[in-house]
Amino acid sequence: MKVLVVGANGQIGRHFVKLLSDDPDHTPIAMIRNEEQISFFNSLNVESVLVSLEDSVKDIAGAMNGCDAVVFTAGSGGSTGADKTLLIDLDGAAKTIEAAQQTGTDRFLMVSAIHADRREQWGEEIAPYYVAKHHADNILRSSGLAYTIIRPGALTNDPGTGKIKAGENLERGSIPREDVAVVLYNALTNDHLSAKTFEIVAGDDDIAAALNRL
């Protein structure tokens, strides 16, 4: 499967691209936004394309042409303001979904955020981030694509454990970014997870088994 990874230079994205690059059944394409990021992907023998989520739908579709799936792991980051959150996490996701529709790239995995559909759980400080994730998820669900929306808890840089808890409505918790990447890797070809939205935090269940019980 040829997979466009949007946000490939992010921490989840790098873990995920590495997993795909180690699997002879998959060919990752890293979508990145500046040339300084190319060297990491060259070291993995992974092709990269220079396209920003602030570029046009046509540009994003050009990067996606020939792909079987797209994985959206992009985010504006915690140091940006609400304007960039709107442009990247919401409109960037919407443009990527539109590009997938145009190119016939049916499989679409989205990294969202835990409780993105529960407004009462959104703190005022990060409300713009949750607004963006909430509406991006809804756009994807109504797109007609074979989507899977993964909503992780608070992200950490702890080593992955290969163990998670997965469900539709979980209590807040944290999860290593490395484990989120493994969830994406397992979900990519799991037809059982098509048209599903679920939350993940650190837990006691093996990742594959937890996903198959959803």
Image: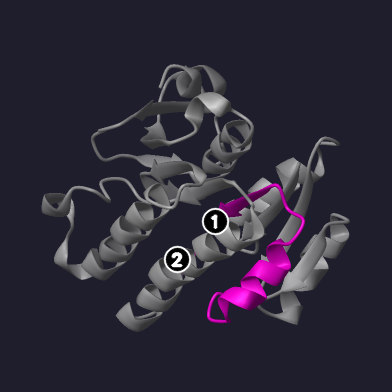
Q: Nearer the viewer, residue 99 or 171?
A: 99
Instruction: Tally the numbered discs.
Output: 2
Q: Quadrant of the N terminus?
A: top right
Q: Residue at the location (34% across, 59% down)?
A: 133
Give the Cα distance between marks 2 and 1: 11 Å
Q: Which residue is mark 1?
A: 72
| Above or below for 2 versus 8 | above
Q: Which residues are magenta?
A: 52-75
Q: Amino acid at mark 1?
A: Phe
| Above or below for 214 versus 72 | above
Q: Amino acid at mark 2?
A: Ala
Q: Position of residue 67 (x, y in %)?
A: 73, 53
Q: Which residue is mark 2?
A: 94
Q: Nearer the viewer, residue 39 or 31?
A: 31
From where the camera sits, is residue 7 visible?
A: no
Q: Position of residue 154 (x, y in %)?
A: 36, 49
Sequence order check, earlier mark of 2 and 1: 1
Mark 2, other Cα within 10 Å: few <14 / some 14–19 / many ≥20: many
Q: Is residue 176 left or right of residue 99?
A: left
| Above or below for 56 versus 26 | below
Q: Is residue 213 left or right of residue 122?
A: right
Q: Residue at the location (64% across, 64% down)?
A: 9
- Residue 62's image quarter? bottom right
Q: Position of residue 70 (x, y in %)?
A: 62, 52
Q: Quadrant of the C terminus?
A: top left
In this picture the colour scheme is: one colour
